[in-house]
Amino acid sequence: MVELKTKMTASGMVYIPKELRDSFGPTLRIIPDARAAVVFPEGARYQDVLDSLEIIASDIRHRIRLAQGRTGDE
């Protein structure tokens, strides 16, 4: 899974890479909290978004294990 980095302009605009724009379409929904936000296409079903978030959470847990020098085999 790839990690993308982007910057916010002084006016609050965020560049969304073309690959995401093509995949997600012109209208997005965003659900934020204090530390993160989920961005998804307007027509996405919440269950599909939740399923995708579980995959992303698993990837983040794996990255944490790698950063701590663990492989998960312990």
Image: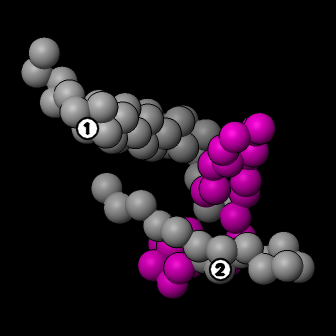
Instruction: Return the residue at label 1.
Output: 66
Return the residue nearer the eye: 35 or 16: 35
Counting from the top left corner in percent of width and height, residue 52 is at 45, 43
Q: Name the kind of residue labelled 2 in the image.
A: Tyr
Q: Secondary structure at mark 1?
A: helix
Return the residue nearer the eye: 50 or 62: 62
Tell me: 16 left or right of 28. Answer: left
Residue most toward the top? Answer: 74
Return the residue nearer the eye: 50 or 9: 9
Q: Name the kind of residue labelled 1 in the image.
A: Leu
Using the image, tell me which numbered label, if any, was put on residue 15.
Answer: 2
Using the image, tell me which numbered label, if any, was put on residue 10.
Answer: none
Q: Residue at x 54, y 43 (%)?
A: 49
Residue most toward the right? Answer: 11
Counting from the top left corner in percent of width and height, residue 42 is at 68, 60
Q: Residue at x 31, y 39 (%)?
A: 67
Counting from the top left corner in percent of width and height, residue 74 is at 13, 15
Q: Quadrant of residue 3?
A: bottom left
Tell me: 63 left or right of 6. Answer: left
